[in-house]
Each structure stands twice: as C-alpha cells, then as structure tokens.
Image (cartoon, grey):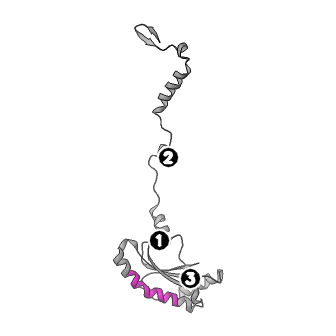
Amino acid sequence: MVQAGGGYIWDMRMTGGTPLIALFTLFALAGCTLPGRQTLAPNPAGADTASISATQAFAGRIPLVTILPGTTDFAAPLAKAVAQARAIKPGVMFDVEAQAPVATGPDTGATTLNDLDDTAKMVAAAIIADGVAPDHVSRSAKTAGLNAGVDVYVK
C-alpha cells in the first residue's frame, strides 16, 4: 500500500495485480444468481385441470363404451361397439368397470358402486351374449373420475 493524500491505495505492482482482480471479481459475482425457470417465466402457467382429470379418470385408457347410471337400453349400441372391436382384433379382451366419483367420499362411493353392480353384470352378460368368450370378459370396480357410470375397456 502506498499513502497518497492522507489515504492508502493499493499499488498493483506490489501485489502482482492478479489476486486482487480475482478477489474483486469474486465479490462482484457473489451477489449474482444464475438464471433459472423463474427468470424467463416468473409466473408459469399451470397445467390444464380438465386434462389432468381426464388422465386420472381413465388411468391412461379411453373407454370403448360408457353407460350412465339408470340406462337400460344399452344392448344395441354395445353390440355394435363389441362387433367393431372384434373386427379390429378378434381375440380382444373386455373389462367392464363400474366407477364412482372420487369427490363423493367413501360411503357414498361404496353405495354408488353397489348400485352400479347390477348394471355392470348386465353389461358383461350382454357382451358374452354377443359372442365373446366368458374368459375374455372381466369385471372390476373403482372410485375414480368425476362421474358415475359403467365403462367398457378393451385390451
């Protein structure tokens, strides 16, 4: 250090200059942060809730037929859908699934599934009556999605 006019200043010749520049650069960069996702989009758009609900409701599968509660005249449209599925894939497997909405709660969901059980049995019997082997038809039940109903999936 050299005294100049009552104060001290750094003499770059005495310190070599390089360590001092590196020290100042380090202090200058210490206050900076690397750019991240929030730098370019501070308020990113959220996912579309309808898409999320649809994905969760069908667990990645889209039903061949959906039968709403109280529907009794499903035999003709179901027979047509079964015939089309068998034309595409002769050994197709059918899964008849009763679904109760998640938002209703466990007690209401169990009651809804119990009520849909008769419809699911009739749907499975109608698929077998349309010429599908009984071992190619399965039944299941779950609480999922937003609406109650019986869905027919193909495998």
Q: Nearer the viewer, residue 85 or 35?
A: 35
**65 in relation to 146, above or below:** below
Could you say where residue 56 lies in the image, as x and y percent from the top left? 47, 68
Quarter of the image with the C terminus is bottom right
Could you say where residue 45 lies in the image, as x and y percent from the top left? 46, 53
The label on residue 57 is: 1
The residue that label 2 is drawn on is 37
Q: Which residues are magenta?
A: 112-125
| Amino acid marked by disc 1 | Ala
Could you say where residue 104 lies in the image, as x and y percent from the top left? 36, 74
The residue that label 3 is drawn on is 94
Residue furthest top in the image: 5
Q: Residue at x 47, y 58 (%)?
A: 47
State the CA–CA distance, disc 2 to disc 1. Answer: 30 Å
Chief SS of the magenta region: helix
**Residue at disc 2, secondary structure:** helix
**Does 128 lie within the magenta span?**
no
Q: Nearer the viewer, residue 1 or 149?
A: 1
| Amino acid marked by disc 3 | Phe
**144 in relation to 39, above or below:** below
Instruction: Give the crowd class for mark 3: few <14, some 14-19, many >=20 residues within 10 Å.
Output: many
